[in-house]
Image: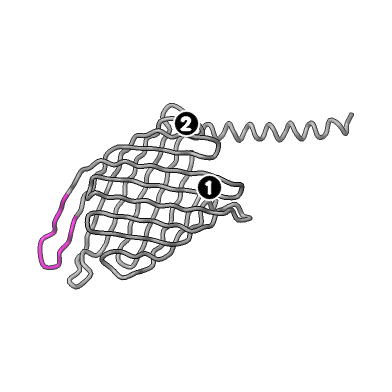
């Protein structure tokens, strides 16, 4: 009787732990995230949040997406180069479909950018523009030990188009490693990135993403880039 009861009690404890984990995940309703991109001529910082409306993130439902960012970059390649400062905000509303560990989300909303150019030989130029933005996100685990993440958006500001795709394979410590490709276009400007990413590293209660590689743009020679991202669920 004791021998039979032992595996039963272990099984019950495991089920209780699973139930507690599922309950904890169901209570999570907000993701707070941030990122930093660095290159030889430009630095970009951003922070934002995704919040479930009327439920938790573990279920399908409506989402509110807010993001704000700022950058500093050279205005021109040759002297006098000048400095351009940009600030942008997006306020988006969308719906997220959840199937197990896979989710697909589609958002739409406003896209606002303010820009200030400090010219060495003249006055600063300040401009604010408004547009609309459509965005899609995908996270999937198609095979055991493999993930696939993709994001894309289109904005009426300068007719911008951006997309990123990153498959990854799980390492013994739990995070994923793999290649990434990213493409961006606006009016007469183009950018293509090819690199490697490390996604899902858990440290200090946060999940981290590191990436780096080589980029080519339509107005500069090829150069290195690096990105750092993090998110926190609560």
Can you name the residue that lies furthest to the right here? 1
- Residue 203 shows in the view: no
Determine the residue positioned at 30% across, 66% down.
41
Tag on residue 60?
A: 2
Q: Residue furthest bottom?
A: 79
Secondary structure under the numbered disc 1 in the rendered image: loop
Question: Any mark on residue 14, and which?
Answer: none
Circles 2 and 1, Cβ within 8 Å, touching? The answer is: no
Q: Secondary structure at mark 2?
A: loop
Residue positioned 42% across, 38% down in the render? 105
Q: Nearer the viewer, residue 51 or 179?
A: 179
| The disc label shown at residue 205, or none | 1
Which residue is nearer to you in this view: 162 or 85? 162
86 vs 131: above or below: below
The residue drawn where x is 35% and y is 37% is: 107
Measuring from the top left, give residue 51's x and y in whole percent: 41, 35
Q: Who comes first in sequence, dot 2 or dot 1?
A: 2
């Amino acid at each position: 009787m004791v021998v039979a009861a032992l595996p039963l009690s272990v099984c019950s404890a495991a089920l209780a732990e699973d139930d507690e984990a599922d309950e904890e995940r169901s209570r999570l309703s907000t993701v707070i995230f941030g990122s930093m991109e660095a290159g030889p001529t430009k630095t970009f910082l951003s922070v934002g949040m995704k919040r479930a409306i009327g439920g938790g993130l573990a279920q399908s439902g409506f989402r509110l997406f807010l993001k704000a960012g700022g950058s500093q970059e050279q205005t021109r390649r040759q002297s006098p180069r000048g400095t351009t400062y940009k600030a942008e905000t997006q306020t988006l509303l969308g719906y997220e479909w959840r199937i197990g560990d896979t989710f697909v989300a589609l958002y739409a909303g406003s896209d606002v950018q303010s820009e200030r150019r400090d010219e060495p030989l003249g006055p600063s130029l300040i401009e604010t523009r408004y547009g609309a933005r459509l965005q899609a996100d995908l996270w999937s685990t198609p095979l055991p030990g493999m993930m696939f993440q993709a994001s894309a958006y289109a904005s009426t500001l300068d007719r911008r188009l951006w997309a990123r795709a990153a498959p990854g394979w799980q390492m013994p410590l739990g995070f994923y490693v793999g290649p990434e490709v990213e493409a961006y276009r606006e009016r007469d400007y183009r950018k293509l990135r090819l690199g490697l990413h490390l996604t899902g590293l858990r440290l200090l209660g946060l999940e981290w993403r590191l990436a780096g590689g080589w980029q080519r743009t339509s107005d500069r020679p090829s150069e290195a880039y690096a990105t750092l991202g993090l998110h926190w669920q609560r």
